[in-house]
DNA sequence: GCCCTGACTGCTA
DNA sequence: TTAGCAGCCAGGG
């Protein structure tokens, strides 16, 4: 059974290129619907470990927008990375969930992926 | 082991 | 409709 952080990283890796998911969405998938802040915290600490292959830029807030409080340059970098994958921002900086939102995985799929990762 | 912090969220006023 | 605020969870000091 991977730790909470590991579960987050594993699920974020499941987000396909050109798609985005919200912090709350990821938190729900790992079994903690109210732990969105923890997801953000996990990704924030992840960013310092660049060798880890996790597409952190594909995780944004519930509004479909980048809202990094500190690390302003990281927010700009995130937007660049997403645009490079074909994701478009409207004039207000919002992403269209209908076009780029990730559908997520079923509980069964999540369980299988986490179990595989735990090996 | 307690206290603080944080890339969030949803409800109230 | 916009702004404030209190939960939520885990890691680090």
Image: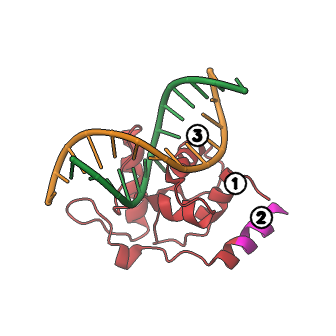
Chain colours: A red, B green, C orange
The quarter of the picture where the N terminus of chain A appears is bottom right
**Same chain letter for marks 3 and 2:** yes
- Residue plotted at (69% across, 54% down): A6
Which residue does the numbered mark 3 point to in the structure image? A48
Which residue does the numbered mark 2 point to in the structure image? A117
For the residues bearing labels 2 and 1, Cβ distance under 8 angstroms: yes
- Residue plotted at (44% across, 68% down): A85
Image side of residue A26 versus residue A90, left or right: right
**x%, y% of residue A23?**
48, 58
Image side of residue A116 versus residue A54, left or right: right
The residue closer to the viewer here, A5 or A44, is: A5
Q: Considering only vertical position in the picture, is A27 above or below A37?
A: below
Mark nearer the N terminus (1 vs 3): 1
- Which residues make up the magenta segment? A111-119
Image quadrant where residue A63 sits: bottom left
Mark nearer the N terminus (2 vs 1): 1
Mark nearer the N terminus (3 vs 2): 3
The residue closer to the viewer here, B6 or A10, is: B6
Q: Considering only vertical position in the picture, is B7 above or below A1?
A: above
């Amino acid at each position: 059974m991977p730790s909470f952080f590991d579960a987050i990283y594993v699920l974020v890796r499941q987000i396909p290129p050109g798609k985005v998911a919200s912090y709350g969405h990821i938190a729900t998938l790992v079994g903690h619907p109210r732990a969105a802040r923890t997801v953000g915290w996990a990704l924030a600490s992840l960013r310092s470990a660049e060798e880890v292959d996790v597409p952190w830029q594909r995780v944004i807030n519930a509004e479909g927008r980048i809202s990094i409080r500190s690390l302003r340059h990281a927010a700009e970098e995130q937007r660049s990375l997403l645009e490079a994958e074909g994701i478009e921002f409207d004039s207000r900086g919002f992403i269209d969930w209908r076009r780029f939102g990730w559908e997520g995985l079923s509980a069964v799929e999540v369980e299988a992926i986490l179990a595989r990762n735990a090996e």
